[in-house]
Amino acid sequence: QQSWAGLIETYRPYLPVTDTTPVVTLLEGNTPLIPAPAIEAQIGRQVRVLVKYDGLNPTGSFKDRGMTMAISKAKEAGAKAVICASTGNTSAAAAAYAKRGGMRAFVLIPDGYVALGKLAQALLYGAEVLAIKGNFDQALHIVRDMATSYPVTLVNSVNPYRLEGQKTAAFEIVEALGTAPDWLCIPVGNAGNITAYWMGFCEYHATGKSDRLPRMMGFQAAGAAPLITGQKVANPDTLATAIRIGNPANWEKAIAVQSASQGQFNAVTDEEILDAYRLLASQEGIFCEPASAASVAGLLKVKDQIPTGATVVCVLTGNGLKDPDTAIKHSQSSFKQGIAPELKAVAEAMGF
Ligand code: F0G
């Protein structure tokens, strides 16, 4: 008997499925909530910080939570093919779940701006990959039109089943802490995930499983921060390619979450993202992708506002292995090459 049966089985009463819904699962969810003492030390006051490491899902990102729902419902409706636009993670998850469900997966990606690991996944899972000479926003526009005119089901986060699946991360956090955190820090691109987390926290609060609601603290990359400036960004630019988005599909929902939770949205620079990315890896032992580190970069940026004694959860949305190029290019670790294969030479290189 296995102890974890995937999030649809676990949270069935909270999800729009029936006994006849064919469940397509890779046993996603149930990811760890890890204490982060190095981040606490940076804050320097008595604040409890934990990270929700959703990079440990089957395809390495939180998208699996939404995709088990979206693909199961697509299969239930008889779909033969799904489509999405993606900065990479959605395409990997869509491909894996669609293939497991016996469907075709078409993915539109911005040519040259998808991290290597994500492209590798989509290709090996068997997606039909279409790279456009344009950005994510343009790709999303095309697939939305495509899904209205052709027999393909859209599985971007404008598909409501995606958010239903993703809200389960909030359930897991409430279960782990016994209540909701005071703050939830989360990277924001299309703003589907922040919307889903808020749904989850509200549902558990309404059923009495938590005695509070968190402030939702959303962070965008400075070069792709339409929710902070209030203006669409025609040419979004950030090394955190996962959130390189200038016109979020869930814009109004995100603003509603911000006001309902008395939350706050802020921008973080690529340098701040890289500092948090390296801190997480080199001091906490947690390798996330750059976009995910925006949650920690953001927390450190607004740390003076955290009430002493508060509990803060930062969401780490994707696994660092997704983007090996950025890791190698921006690590500050010692890497000596060309050493002779002898004890003495190695000892010398070690500084002994
Ligand atoms: N973090 C990662 C690692 C992501 O891949 C994304 C979105 C986000 C954060 C932002 O989540 O869009 O719900 O606000 N990635 C999408 C994709 C756009 O295509 O994989 P959001």
Image: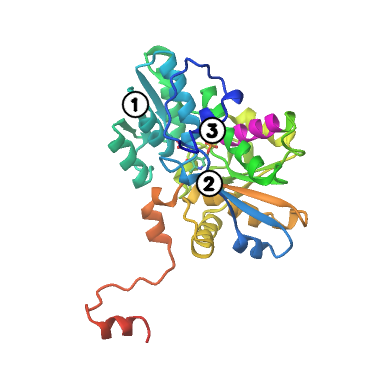
Q: Which residue is mark 3?
A: 247
- Of the residues tagged 3 and 1, which is closer to the observer? 1
Q: Which residues are magenta?
A: 190-204
Q: Locate residue 209: give its quadrant.
A: top right
Residue positioned 35% across, 46% down in the render: 117
Between 133 and 79, the one nearer to me in the picture? 79
Res 274 visible: yes
Density class for disc 2 (Cα within 10 Å; few <14, some 14-19, many ≥20) is many
From the image, give the main secondary structure of the stretch colored magenta.
helix
- Of the residues tagged 2 and 1, which is closer to the observer? 1
Circle 3: residue type? Asn
Q: Position of residue 320 (x, y in %)?
A: 43, 52
Q: Which residue is mark 2?
A: 223
Q: Are marks 2 and 3 in contact (CB under 8 Å)?
A: no
Q: Earlier in the sequence, mark 2 or mark 1?
A: 1
Which structural element holds mark 1?
strand
Q: CA distance from mark 2 to mark 1?
A: 30 Å
Q: Position of residue 185 (x, y in %)?
A: 63, 46
**114 relative to 186 in the view: left or right:** left
Q: Quadrant of the N terminus?
A: top left
Is 317 located above or below residue 37 in the figure? above
Between 67 and 175, the one nearer to me in the picture? 175
Is 80 located above or below residue 46 in the figure? above
Q: Which residue is mark 1?
A: 105
Q: Is residue 198 magenta?
A: yes
* Residue sticking out furthest to the front: 1
Which structural element holds mark 2?
helix
Q: CA distance from mark 3 to mark 1?
A: 24 Å
